[in-house]
Image (cartoon, rainbow, N blue to C red):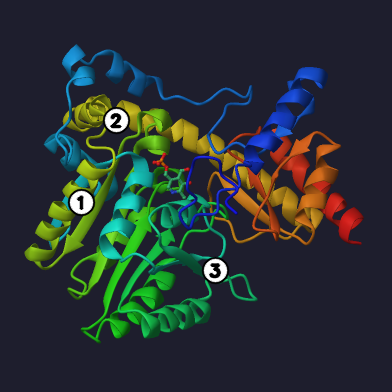
Amino acid sequence: MSKFIMAQENARIISGEDKIFGINKKAQEMIASVGRDKVANATIGSLLDDSGNLVVLSSVVEVLKGLQPVDYAEYAPITGVPSFLQAAIKAVYMDHVPSCNIEAIATPGGTGAIHNTIQNYTKRGDTILTSDWYWSPYNTIAQEIERKLETYPLFDENFKFNHKGFSDKVRELLSREDRLVIIINTPAHNPTGYSLTLEDWDHVLALLKAEAEDKTKKIVLLVDAAYLDFAGDAKEFREFLPKLENLPDNLLPLIAYSMSKSFTLYGMRGGALICLSPNKAITDEFKMVNAFTNRGTWSNGTRCAMVALSRIFESKSLFDTVVSEREEALQLLLRRGTAFMKAAEKAGLVTCPFTLGFFAIVPCDQCDAVGEELQKDGIFTVPFGGRGLRVSVASISEEWCSILPAKMAAAIKKVNG
Ligand SMILES: Cc1ncc(COP(=O)(O)O)c(C=O)c1O
């Protein structure tokens, strides 16, 4: 019998519980009773300052304030404001101009870009592939449109990218289905903070090119670049991008771009899906099918977010101001990540490989119990996938970042012996 009264579950698993929300609520209650400085709320997926307030780039807010009423009120074109699409491509590629056809379509955040990819490049019932540590909405999005998610192990026993695990899973899925969408979230992967190295990319692409020699297969590689501007040096972490140019026609790279972190506009739902192909018919088709999906889901995106990005990219001085303000936010994150990792090493706490990101992962058994143990000390983390604790270094101070690892090591020892 259905557990719903009026609603239909439609092959989705809808539990109604939001674990993160629940833990966050507990943290807020503790803050109210003992004070903010006694609580580390490392559950939140946004960059907060040391007082717990959202970091908002004031230069971006100024751009918004300077927009005209029509920039807020008017519909955007279904595919997005043209100058925004150019700006989104520039935001990803900076000064590099890809040597192949490139198209973009506006989406509500990176989430919309992920949805569009799954909708347009797989069929109902197909399997989407991502790593075993993954941002859980991938699964929600896949289920919502009647697809399934399977995973490969992200790390091997030496905590390096698991090339064998990746290859085995890609081959297995391509032996079952002729289509495959693979989602790779890099740089600054959520939830581990790992960024694929250039060597990792060479392995990944060599495998996919070999698989694409079978022309009956259609492989789509979605790079979820939500944290592109919070990974470290902007140029260094974009060095992999030219590797995605001029791949075989049946190996299509797409990039999910998001304004949420890069411009601290989480709520404005600005994003884009970018497509690269040596074959113009494929990029034209991309535009056509994604326009259809936009129309059939959210229609058009948030015009003022699009206009704001256009303005930022139209003015060199404005762009420089935003980038230098963002650099300060990046340095804040970097100091916290470094403090956490240094303290982890000192405390002998094992973490997943971390270059930088909003989150770090501490693998451990009985993570729910360890998480509860930590809460007694005012430390709130998120048990993740039943095999680790996710720590948001983005939402706690540098001081807390250096305190947490020893406390976590002690809690793991207490619970697991
Ligand atoms: C891994 C990952 N991908 C994509 C997104 C998309 O975010 P948005 O839809 O706000 O752009 C997020 C946001 O937290 C994320 O963590």
Q: Position of residue 281 (x, y in %)?
A: 7, 64
In the rendered image, residue 70, in percent from the top left (x then y), is placed at 17, 16
Q: Find disc 3 in the rendering and name its residue.
A: 154
Q: In the rendered structure, find residue 290 and report the number of the disc placed on it.
A: 1
Q: Amino acid at mark 3?
A: Leu
Contact check, label 2 and label 3, Cβ < 8 Å: no
Front residue of this view, candidates 2 and 129: 2
For residue 320, the mark is 2
Q: Quadrant of ligand 1?
A: top left
- Identify the residue shown where x is 55% and y is 40%: 5
- Residues under labels 2 and 3: Cα distance? 36 Å
Q: Marks 1 and 2: CB-CB under 8 Å?
A: no
User: Could you say whether the residue bearing mark 1 is in a helix, strand or loop?
Assistant: helix
Category of crowding for the residue at label 1, using alpha-carbon neighbours closer than 10 angstroms: few (below 14), some (14–19), many (at least 20): many
Residue plotted at (62% across, 24% down): 52
Front tag of 2 and 3: 3
Q: Is residue 258 above or below residue 154?
A: above
